[in-house]
Image (cartoon, helix red, strand yellow):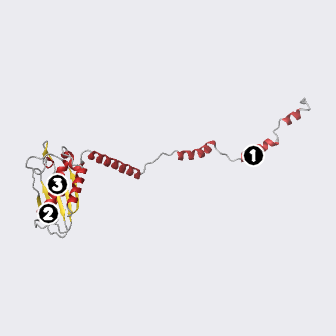
Amino acid sequence: MAKKFHFDDEDDIQDEYQPSSYLDDLESKRENVPYTAIDEEDDEEEEPMKKKKKGFVMKWWHYLLILFGALAVAFIIYIVVLSFNNGPVYGDRCEGMVSVSKDARDSTVSTMEEKYDEIESMTLSTECRQLKLDITFKAGMSTKEAQNIAEETVQTLDGIVGREKEDGQKYSDLFGTIDGVTQYEVNVFMTSSDSEDFPIYGTKNIQNDEFSYTLASVRDEESAKKAQETLTDE
């Protein structure tokens, strides 16, 4: 067999293209490096982001606060509406009433307190169709004098308001009827210590110049009860 011919430097060329020892070392290092998937690293980074993006969750007490807030707003609206309608009790029943100003009431009280030393305190107020007069007298006040002072107080207020009176009448139409609308009835409550007739309840109805009184000394409890109701109810 013929001997294969080759050059002397062929062995050198083959040795030149053989893998070097450092390549073997690199391959070995790669095998020892722990494997970490890219997706796992991304998941670890995205997990906190997901927690931050978690939406607001309503609790039961949130709904309770909203309910209380709605009720409060509704109540405020209700009160405002009633204030434009003269209150929840009276409504349109007060339309057509002649106004008795606070200045007129205060002037009446000042006049009467200056005139009579027996008066300890006095208040005048109006509620729709009622004029309410409360008088506290000093101890030992006589029944008749107390009644006279109460009636004079109403007459004084009537004169300060300045409505016209019909001939022969003690009071003006402020305590009668104006344009078909009935005006004020009067309710009086008088107290005085060390006087057996007190407290005294008095009323003056529309179109009636005379007052009627119920005394504490009267043993008719039903009459006293009715008199008391006129001071609290319309």
Q: Is residue 30 left or right of residue 15?
A: left
Label 1 element class: helix
Q: Position of residue 108 (x, y in %)?
A: 21, 54
Please identify, in this view, whether the residue under mark 1 or under mark 2 is nearer the observer. Answer: 2
What is the residue that sits farthest to the right in this orientation?
A: 8
What is the residue that sits farthest to the bottom in this orientation?
A: 194
Q: Are marks 3 and 2 in contact (CB under 8 Å)?
A: no
Q: Is residue 215 left or right of residue 127?
A: left
Q: Position of residue 106 (x, y in %)?
A: 24, 54
Residue at 38% x, 51% y: name it. Answer: 64
Which label belongs to residue 177?
Answer: none
Residue 80 vs residue 21, the one in the foreground: 80
Q: Quadrant of residue 27?
A: top right
Label 3 element class: helix
Residue 234 visible here: no
Q: Which residue is mark 3?
A: 154
Residue 38 visible here: yes
Which label belongs to residue 145?
Answer: 2
Q: Marks 1 and 3, how far apart in space?
A: 115 Å
Amino acid at the residue labelled 2: Glu
Amino acid at the residue labelled 3: Val
Q: Marks 3 and 2, how far apart in space?
A: 15 Å
Q: Which residue is mark 1?
A: 29
Residue at 54% x, 45% y: name it. Answer: 50
Amino acid at the residue labelled 1: Lys
Q: Residues within 10 Å of mark 3 (few under 14, many from 20)?
A: many
